[in-house]
């Protein structure tokens, strides 16, 4: 029978082809005959149709491990070097414990099991990670919900650190179409070096919040001027001054966000450049009105004068007295000048009297919050007990941004 073989498109085509294949197999055609050639072609088109309609299920990683154990006549104890302990081997093979990336990497290297079988996707395991993921602030990240809702033990966090941390950064990086800046050039102020891993996580959280904000304007070079800063500082005279400042900055294309600091970062704030967006991120580590305004102005000077694609982040510990770089001294000086001009301070009664009524009088003259004047007196004298009533009565800035301080 001379049959023309076509590509199978329907179930009826498939059924007819299978029936014809069965008939030819029953006939057992001679090798090289026309029916033998027809049989081979039918087998190919049937296989192609089945693969398109019924794709094969991915190999099971546990079955792959068991198969390799059977091939090499291995016992469970022989997997200890790859999985970690006999109890872990038993839990993995019993499907009670998932494979970690470190286990997968060792199984791939030691037993030659393909990465895509073990991990379920194409993954380059040939190069060991150059990051010690266990040194990230795993407990703090879990506490902030950065790994999801499930709570893990300290040992579990450490064992699956690579998956958790890389998963966190992958989840962050998609927002807004720009990658999260990891290990980008950043400037840390002062001699007390911040924990770089914790700083990266904090930076990623702050960037995510900034990218989620709908800014009202677009930043243009030259926006920040002495008068612009003075207009901003006058908003401090209002009870909701920090909220008004956030709106003011949004009008000019600057995102102001809040992200609590991580332990070992000693961080007050940072100025960041993310593509075309300028960002000021504050921790409110010192949750006072005077500190908020000084930190904000300090970071805005970095935005105005220091941020570049080559230096896209300045992270600041404003308590550190060893900050001696030209950029940090300039940011301190210009922030102070914007808050209380030196010429005004030189003749102000409060600069020598340290009296509350004089502080309030100067605040009224400059149209700023009295806590800013109190902060200047305390910093100048290094007597943090002076004018404490003006500081405490101003309240906490964080009360204005409770929802924004939460993880997003």
Image (tube, helix red, strand yellow):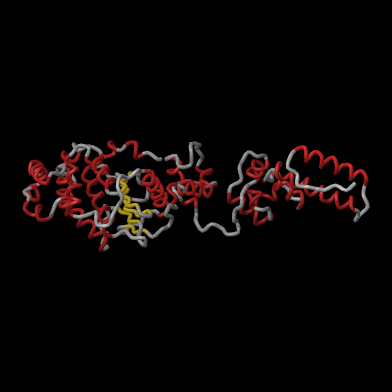
Count of picture labels? 0
Residue 292 or residue 244, whichever sits in front: 244
Which residue is rendered at x = 27% and y = 53% of the image? Answer: 299
**Residue 366, image x and y in percent?**
11, 46
Q: Is residue 59 visible?
A: yes
State the residue at coordinates (48%, 46%).
171
In terms of image quadrants, where is residue 126?
A: bottom right
Q: Is residue 382 visible?
A: no
Q: In this view, does 365 lie to the left or right of 168?
A: left
Across and down, in percent, residue 138 comes to 46, 46
Residue for point 38% across, 46% down: 211
Q: Residue at x 22, y 37 (%)?
A: 240
Figure quadrant of the C terminus: top left
Left or right: 216 as drawn, with respect to 102: left
The one nearer the camera, 154 or 255, is 255
The picture places residue 362, in percent across and down from the top left corner, at: 9, 45
Q: Nearer the viewer, residue 239 or 37?
A: 37
> In x, y percent, where is residue 204?
41, 49
Looking at the image, residue 380 sits to the left or right of residue 326; the answer is: left
């Amino acid at each position: 029978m001379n049959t023309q073989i076509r590509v199978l498109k329907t179930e009826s085509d498939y059924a007819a082809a299978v029936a014809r294949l069965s008939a030819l197999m029953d006939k057992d055609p001679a090798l090289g005959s026309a029916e033998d050639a027809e049989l081979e072609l039918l087998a190919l088109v049937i296989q192609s149709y089945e693969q398109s309609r019924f794709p094969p299920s991915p190999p099971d990683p546990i079955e792959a491990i068991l198969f390799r154990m059977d091939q090499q006549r291995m016992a469970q104890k022989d997997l200890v070097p790859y999985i970690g302990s006999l109890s872990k081997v038993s839990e993995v093979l019993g499907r009670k414990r998932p494979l970690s990336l470190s286990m997968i990497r060792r199984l791939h290297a030691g037993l030659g099991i393909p990465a895509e079988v073990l991990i379920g996707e194409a993954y380059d395991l040939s190069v060991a990670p150059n990051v010690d993921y266990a040194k990230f602030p795993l407990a703090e990240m879990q506490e902030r919900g950065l790994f999801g809702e499930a709570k893990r033990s300290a040992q579990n966090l450490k064992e699956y650190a690579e998956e958790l941390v890389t998963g966190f950064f992958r989840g962050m990086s998609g927002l807004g179409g720009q990658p999260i800046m990891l290990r980008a050039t950043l400037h840390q102020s002062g001699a007390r070096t911040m924990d770089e891993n914790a700083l990266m996580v904090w930076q990623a959280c702050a960037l995510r919040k900034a990218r989620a904000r709908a800014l009202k304007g677009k930043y243009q070079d030259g926006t920040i001027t002495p008068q612009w800063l003075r207009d901003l500082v006058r908003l401090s005279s209002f009870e909701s001054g920090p909220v008004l400042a956030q709106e003011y900055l949004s009008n000019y294309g600057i995102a102001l966000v809040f992200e609590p600091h991580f332990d070992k970062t000693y961080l007050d704030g940072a100025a960041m450049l993310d593509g075309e967006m300028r960002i000021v991120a504050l921790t409110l580590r010192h949750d006072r009105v005077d500190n908020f305004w000084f930190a904000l102005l300090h970071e805005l000077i970095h935005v105005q004068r220091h941020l570049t694609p080559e230096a896209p982040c300045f992270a600041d510990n404003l308590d550190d007295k060893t900050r001696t770089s030209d950029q940090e001294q300039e940011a301190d000086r210009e922030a102070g000048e914007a808050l209380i001009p030196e010429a005004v301070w030189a003749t102000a009664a409060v600069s020598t009297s340290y009296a509350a009524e004089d502080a309030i009088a100067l605040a009224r003259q400059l149209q700023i919050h009295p806590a800013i004047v109190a902060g200047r007196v305390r910093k100048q004298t290094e007597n943090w007990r002076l004018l404490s009533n003006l500081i405490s009565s101003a309240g906490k800035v964080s009360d204005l941004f409770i929802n924004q301080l939460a993880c997003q």
